[in-house]
Image (cartoon, helix red, strand yellow):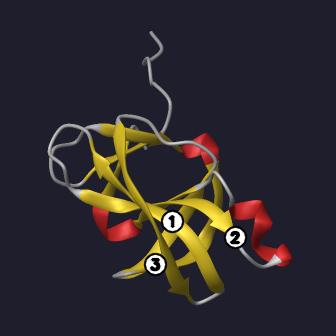
Amino acid sequence: MAEMVGPRLYSCCNCRNQVALHDDVISKSFQGRNGRAFLFSHAMNIMVGPKEDRQLVTGLHTVADVYCCDCREVLGWKYERAYEETQKYKEGKFILEKSKVVNENW
């Protein structure tokens, strides 16, 4: 009998709320506040905080912190606007820090 396995997911490290699908990973080579981070096309079960301009490694961006909707843990941020043309591909995408998420169904 075959074992049923669901999609590979990323969950909040604090409460295990599912926040992203592995299939939505765009890149694993980003830098977060606390080390390595992943760029996702989509995120779920999160809340988006207020927008603010932030100077990041790749220049000035308008970002909004993203929080787990269950426990309010800060997981990363959403790129709202990129001021440099070469960074426009990030707009509307999500950074989730590796230290803030855990793998599920791997």
Q: Residue at x 44, y 17 (%)?
A: 4
Residue 34 image label: none
Dot 2 or dot 3: first in sequence order is 3
Whole-angstrom CA distance, mark 2 to mark 3, is: 20 Å
Q: Label 3 sits on what residue type?
A: Arg
User: Looking at the image, which residue sits at the far top?
Assistant: 1
Q: Secondary structure at mark 2?
A: strand
18 relative to 25, above or below: above
Point 18% across, 49% down: residue:
72
Q: Quadrant of residue 42?
A: top right
Who comes first in sequence, dot 3 or dot 1? 3
Q: Secondary structure at mark 3?
A: strand
Dots 3, 1 in contact, CB < 8 A: no
- The three-letter code of the residue at mark 2 reads Ala
Q: Residue furthest right?
A: 85
Q: Residue at x 58, y 61 (%)?
A: 79
Front residue of 55/69: it is 55
Instruction: Return the mark for residue 82.
Output: 2
Q: Position of residue 37 (x, y in %)?
A: 48, 71
Q: Nearer the viewer, mark 2 or mark 3?
A: 2
Q: Is residue 74 found left or right of 20 in the rendered image?
A: left
84 lies above or below 41: below
Q: Which mark is residue 63?
A: 1
Task: Name the residue that disc number 3 marks.
Answer: 36
- Helix, strand or loop at label 1? It is strand
In the image, residue 35 sits, relative to residue 16, either above or below, namely below
Q: Nearer the viewer, residue 103 or 96?
A: 96
